[in-house]
Amino acid sequence: RSTFDETNVFSASFTFQSPFGKGGMGSNKYVRGIAGGWSLNGIVQLSTGLPYEVQASNSIPNVCACNTERANLVGNPNSGNLGVNTTWFNVGAYANPAPYTFGNNPRNSLRGDWGRNVDLSLFRQFHIGLGDTRYFEFRAEGFNIFNNVVFNNPDSNLADTNVGRVTGQNNTPRQLQ
């Protein structure tokens, strides 16, 4: 697996126009004036997490100036008390390989947190006696509107004190404008 492999990616956009307005539903001019002319747009994005691998403490094979090497897989990486507050994978399932050998852990065998995001915009044009070509526009936009947290891949170096722990966020928090 490649380091940037996102096996499944879903992206969809939509636009919803208020049915109240010129030529639309509702004959009451007050209903048309309040509920007419609004538009709601959105983008929904979902994706699988990015792959990563657990690395040994240092350059055990001693074949180059590289200071990273895949660890040995000695147990089930998906067993135990896993979660964001503890560890993302079973740290005890990995060990440093013997001196002058390569680790047997498959390349990028684990996946990080899956991506999810919803962006929305709401706007309306106000024609106030200026004709159809000139108007005022109200616009409100929200990015990551549900404030979903997508975690970074966990620290995957056996030599680090935070091995197996997630220490950051991979997306931006909600933004409104």
Image (cartoon, rainbow, N blue to C red):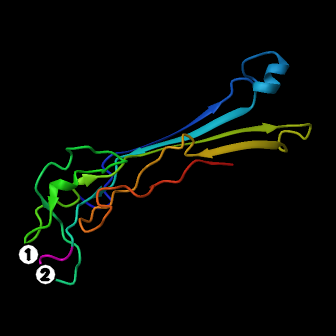
Please, what secondary structure does the residue beneath circle 2 have? loop
Report the residue that reaches farthest toward the right: 129
Horizontal and vertical percent for residue 1?
23, 58
Left or right: residue 60 compared with residue 134: left
Residue 136 marker: none
**Which image quadrant is residue 53 in?**
bottom left
From the viewer's side, name the closer residue of 109 and 156. Answer: 156
Residue at 8% across / 75% down in the picture? 99
Horizontal and vertical percent for residue 90?
22, 51
Please, what secondary structure does the residue beneath circle 1 have? loop
Does residue 24 appear anywhere in the picture?
yes
Marks 1 and 2 in Cβ contact (< 8 Å): yes
Q: How many marks?
A: 2
Residue 127 vertical position relative to residue 70 in the rendered view, above or below: above
Q: Which residues are magenta?
A: 58-62
Predominant secondary structure in magenta?
Answer: loop
Question: What's under tag 2, amino acid-wise?
Answer: Asn
Residue 101 located within the stretch drawn in magenta: no
Horizontal and vertical percent for residue 22?
77, 26
Residue 61 located within the stretch drawn in magenta: yes
Question: What's under tag 1, amino acid-wise?
Answer: Pro
Residue at 7% across / 77% down in the picture? 100
The residue indicated by pointer 2 is: 62
Residue at 77% across / 42% down in the picture? 138
The residue indicated by pointer 1 is: 99
Query: Which numbered disc flags the more N-terminal residue, 1 or 2?
Result: 2
